[in-house]
Amino acid sequence: MKKDESQLDQISTTDKLKAMKTLKEAGLKVEFSGSGVPTVICASASDISKELKNVKRILKELRYQGSFGVRAPRKTDQGQITETSENPIEQEDGGEAVPA
């Protein structure tokens, strides 16, 4: 049986998940964006070019041919982290917090 060229060109979701898992194992912060593309989040915008080379090398070793992304952190990324750390679960006197 001969496969269509269109089938060979398509990248399966399994390949994208495998790429995401491999990038996480390499110590990178990765998200699976709404478009279904694994995206690496750099520590700062100045690190993008360095991380891009690293990500390309990792994915080449994996033989991943699909799309991927590299981006700087958003302001909302930092906001979510600080919000969760500011909400105490327990009060300072050892009692439980009561919902308002």
Image (tube, helix red, strand yellow):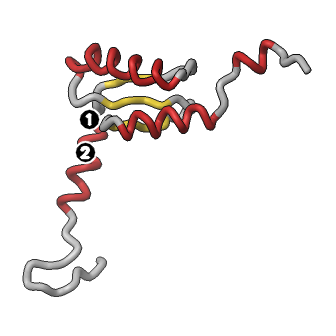
Q: Residue furthest left?
A: 93
Left or right placement of residue 57 versus residue 92 in this view:
right
Outermost residue, right side = 1
Rendered image: mark on residue 79: 2
Q: Is residue 89 above or below residue 48?
A: below
Q: Amino acid at mark 2?
A: Gly
Q: Where residue 59 sits: x, y (%)? A: 46, 23
- Disc 1 residue type? Lys
Label 1 belongs to which residue? 75
Give the residue at x 33% y 37%.
29
Question: Is 35 on the left-hand or right-hand side of 48?
Answer: right
Residue at the spot x=57%, y=18% of the render?
Answer: 65
Q: Few, some or many C-alpha atoms within 10 Å of disc 2 (few <14, some 14-19, many ≥20)?
A: few
- Identity of the residue drawn at 21% across and 26% down: 44
Q: Nearer the viewer, residue 88 or 9?
A: 9
Q: For numbered disc 2, what is the local secondary structure? A: helix
Q: Secondary structure at mark 1?
A: helix
Q: Quadrant of residue 16?
A: top right
Q: In which quadrant is the C terminus drawn? A: bottom left
The answer to whether mark 1 and mark 2 are in CB contact below 8 A is yes
Q: Position of residue 27 (x, y in %)?
A: 30, 38
22 relative to 53, above or below: below
Q: Position of residue 98 (x, y in %)?
A: 26, 82
Q: From the viewer's perspective, is residue 98 above or below residue 85? A: below
As measured in the structure, the alpha-carbon distance from the residue carrying label 1 to the one carrying label 2 is 6 Å
Numbered tag placed on residue 87 in the rendering:
none
Look at 43% across and 38% down and name the residue there. Answer: 31
Seen in the image, is 8 located left or right of residue 46?
right
